[in-house]
Amino acid sequence: MRLHGNALRVTAYVGESDTVHGRPLYSEIVHRAHAAGLAGASVFRGIEGFGASSLIHTTRLLSLSEDLPVAVVIVDTEERVRAFLPVLDELVGEGLVTLDEVAVLHYRGREASA
C-alpha cells in the first residue's frame, strides 16, 4: 500500500482499562482497523492525564495508576478514515476521538522475506 501526501489522522483517547467484548478497547480498535485494511494503527500509553471525569490518572501514585490514558492513532487516506469512523463511534462509549489533516512524508514497510 502506498500512502503519500494529504491524509487524515484519527486519534481515540480512551482508558487503559476500557474493554469491549472482554478485550481491551485499544486492542479491539487496532484489530478492527487492521481488518478494515487501514494503513496502520499505533497505541500510545500515557503516563499521566485526565479527561471528562476530571480524575487525574498517573503512574506516580500506585492508587491512581490503574486506568492510565491510552491514545490509538490511525493515519490513512480521507476516504478510508471516514469509512472507519462509524466503527469508532460504535466502540468508544467514553473517551475522545479527534480528526486531523496531516501530510504523509514517508510510509514504507519492511520488504517481505523470501
Image (cartoon, rainbow, N blue to C red):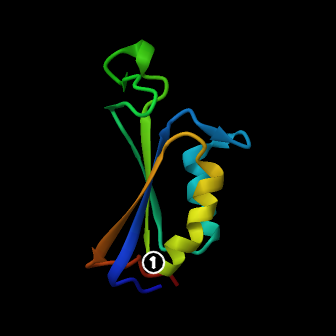
Question: Circle 1 — which element?
Answer: helix
Residue at 48% across, 23% down: 66
Left/right placement of residue 95 relative to residue 104 reads right
Left/right placement of residue 15 relative to residue 5 reads right
Instruction: Tell me the quarter of the picture where residue 36 sits.
Output: bottom right
Residue 38 in sight from this viewpoint? no
Question: How many numbered dots are placed on residues in this image?
Answer: 1
Q: Where's residue 69, x and y in %?
A: 42, 36
> Please, is residue 27 above or below residue 41 in the view?
above
Residue sticking out furthest to the right: 21
> Please, is residue 65 above or below residue 9 in the view?
above
Instruction: Tell me the quarter of the picture where residue 84 sits.
Output: bottom right
Q: Where's residue 1, x and y in %?
A: 47, 85
Q: Amino acid at mark 1?
A: Glu
Q: Where's residue 11, x and y in %?
A: 42, 56
Q: Where's residue 9, x and y in %?
A: 39, 66
> Please, is residue 63 above or below residue 110 in the view?
above
> Please, is residue 4 above or below residue 89 in the view?
below
Instruction: Tell me the quarter of the picture where residue 31 sits.
Output: bottom right
What residue sits right under mark 1 in the picture? 78
Residue at 33% across, 71% down: 101
